[in-house]
Image (tube, rainbow, N blue to C red):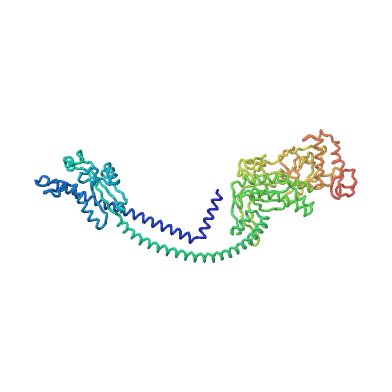
Amino acid sequence: MQQLISRALQFFLKQIFERTVLILIILLCIGVGAALSNIFYLSNNLIESQALKNADLTMQSIEEGVNLYSQRVVDRVTTIPGIDVRPDYIGHPGGIPIPATYAIELGQDLSQNISQKNPGTLYRLYSDFPFSYRKPEGGVKDDFEKNALLALRQNPNQPFFRIEHYQGHLSLRYATASVMNATCVACHNTRPDSPKKDWKIGDVRGAWEFIQPLDSLKEQTNNTLMGSFITLGGIFSLGVMGVSLSFSRLRQTSKELELRVRERTDSLAKANIELGKSNSLIRQIFGRYLSDEIVANLLENTEGLKLGGERQRVTILTSDLRGFTGLAERLSPEEVIKILNFYLDCMANVITKYQGTIDEFLGDGILVVFGAPIVRKDDAARAVACAIEMQLAMASVNEQMQEWELPKLEMGIGINTGIVVVGNIGSEKRAKYGLVGSQVNLAYRIESCTLGGQILISETTLKAAGSIVRINGQKEVQLKGVKQPITIYDVAGITGEYNLFLTQQQEIFYSLPQAIPVQYVVLDGKKIGETVCTGSLVKLSQTGALVRCAHMDGEIPSALSKIKLNLLPPNHPAETNEDIYGQVTDKPSASGSFYVYFTAMSQNVEARLDELYQSLRTNVPAESDSTNINNSSPPFQALVENSILCSNCGRMNIASSKFCSQCGEPLNR
């Protein structure tokens, strides 16, 4: 039904546009017809009103004359001898007419005089109780007179009138009540020939009727209207001609303009297509380096190209892969790029989902900002939710790594909220949209404290995100470049509309039947410290170990510091194995020992430690004491005691082997 109405409306509008002149002429005709009809209606009302006014004035004049005759003449002469007031006064010496007769004769005379100018005018008195000698002309003759008497007896003060055809003329018939006064009552009730002798003062004896033909008035009015009609017709004709000529010229001009517009539209359409292709290409190219919001700001806002920045409260998210540098050193550049592209693509999809702006990719690190260039109320909460989903997405990343037969990747994320300067940074020739400030550095420092799979946030982020954030714990840390210690929080999940939680894995440490000697060095940023300490691995988990210092008063690395370890072969303690990078955790430990979380190691070492860990799982109770373990455990003996180091590649091999299982070179005894 709605579609039918819409089509009908479209058809109607189309007809209006295509037949404008015809429609305007029709509208003009309707308007002129309405105007003429209204004039005709008003003229009829005017005629009726004028006729009623004339009739009322005439009746008032006759009534005043009759009253004057009755009061000033009749009442005075009745006391004069020789004067007889009677209806048939003609032929009687000294007789004068009674007031009714006087009124009848006065009306007849007036009718004759007026009829000369307006034929058909008549004034008469009639009653349904006329004297016998007046029955022919004084009795009721038609329905109007019957209805008039009935109406006047009900309401003597209200005249009764009607416009109708009378004796071939359209006439106004106007009747008023003839009311009995004292003189009339005395006369009618005492006369022997009176048809009714019980009249009372105020009774309606009959009706005075004034009949006024309206032909002359209508003719005069019609003549006037005819002149008006002719004038309006002339104006209408001139208007139609003017409209026709105007629209004819407008049609011609419209066709010319339409042709020009069509040509211009075609030209603009081609230009728009080319511009759209250019914009699409620009968005496609720059969208790979900038977020959609920044690209839109550059393309749609000329101010977006100006250098400079503004202070703005944002939430900064930084992420980094643990041990990726060491992995990259062992792979070809093509494989590194393949891994990075896949990893960054997965992370970028998650970041885009949560409306984060990727400021830059720094190798395997990502810098994301929430709150620039567009500020939203839930920037901090979205940043936390984004970080959780990024960690959860690492499962699919590692599935692909397993298919490529590569070690799994682990990522740490740090989040901070604060005031930074955001905007276009650089020069007129080369610039980037970025952010600077101490809060950015603080975000990097917080991220450096994370372990693989962990998310740490600052207190400002926790407050900004609200109570929906769930945390595992908190710790106070002294970060490099920050004067005062700060509290950072370990994120477990987020509730509310996001409802995301990290997978919690319990880390189980197994005591080694025989400690594995190691040496370690504390790292200062990218620099390796000068002090080399020795110790041994006494407990092992899937991702870390408990290190016991060789000397109880030896240097214990502080929590969250980075260290480099090397396994020392039991048979050749002076030779070091491949590097293992780790981070000291804040897990409580006995005096002279510390827990370390492995962040990077060679595939060789990782395979051997994993093999050892799996054998411990099946033979050693979790967190058990090494003194209660059978030191002759075959898996452990094969992996630790009876091992020999390859001088070529550094792989630890079983002592009975003649050739290295890694590089195939002969093993030197």
Residue 56 locus on image (x, y percent) = 26, 50
Residue 293 locus on image (x, y percent) = 62, 53
Decide: is 91 above or below 19: above
Which of the pair 117/541 is nearer the observer? 117
Can residue 539 be seen in the rendering of this structure? yes
The number of callouts visible is 0
Horizontal relation, residue 409 to residue 144: left or right: right
Residue 83 locus on image (x, y percent) = 11, 47
Residue 598 locus on image (x, y percent) = 76, 44
Can residue 475 be seen in the rendering of this structure? no
Within the image, what quadrant is residue 640 found in? top right
Horizontal relation, residue 155 to residue 448: left or right: left
Q: Residue furthest left?
A: 81
Decide: is 113 above or below 127: below
Horizontal relation, residue 657 to residue 50: left or right: right
Decide: is 19 above or below 197: below
Which of the pair 212/166 is nearer the observer? 166
Which of the pair 169/51 is nearer the observer? 169
Q: Residue furthest top?
A: 628
